[in-house]
Image: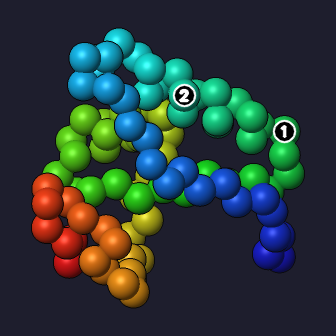
Amino acid sequence: MLRRGVSWHVHDVFVAADRRGCGIGRALMARLIAATRGIDGASVTLFVMDDNAVALGLYRDLGFVKREGMSMFILGVDRYRIGGRASE
């Protein structure tokens, strides 16, 4: 039986360069995860770039698992710029 629940999507998590490594990102994500506890059928989704090892490690530590077999599609790619160039 499939159940429809509340889905929370994390769009962006940024921590100022001089504050990275202080646990701010972990604390923000932990607070979000705690807020979803007790909500029947709740899920949290996010996207992260494959080369962002720090974020990948954080999300794995928090219990996130990579969803195999999914692809991300974007229309209007010029709105999504990485390092001064549009992402593909």
Q: How is the image coloured?
A: rainbow
Residue 69 shows in this picture: no
Which image quadrant: the N terminus? bottom right
Position in image of residue 28 (x %, y %): 54, 28
> Could you say which is closer to the camera, residue 87 or residue 30?
87
For the point 66% across and 54% down, the residue is 8
Residue 74 shows in this picture: yes
C-beta proximity under 8 Å, tags 2 and 1: no
Position in image of residue 62 (x %, y %): 48, 34
Q: Secondary structure at mark 1?
A: loop
Quarter of the view holding residue 85: bottom left
> Could you say which is closer to the camera, residue 80 or residue 42?
80
Mark 2 or 1: in front is: 2
Q: Which residue is mark 2?
A: 28
Give the amino acid at mark 1.
Gly
> Mark number for residue 58?
none
Position in image of residue 64 (x %, y %): 48, 46
Quarter of the view holding residue 6: bottom right
Q: Residues within 10 Å of mark 1 (few under 14, many from 20)?
A: few
Left or right: 8 as drawn, with respect to 42: left
Position in image of residue 40 (x %, y %): 85, 51
Give the amino acid at mark 2.
Leu
Q: Which residue is mark 1?
A: 38
For the point 30% across and 80% down, the residue is 77
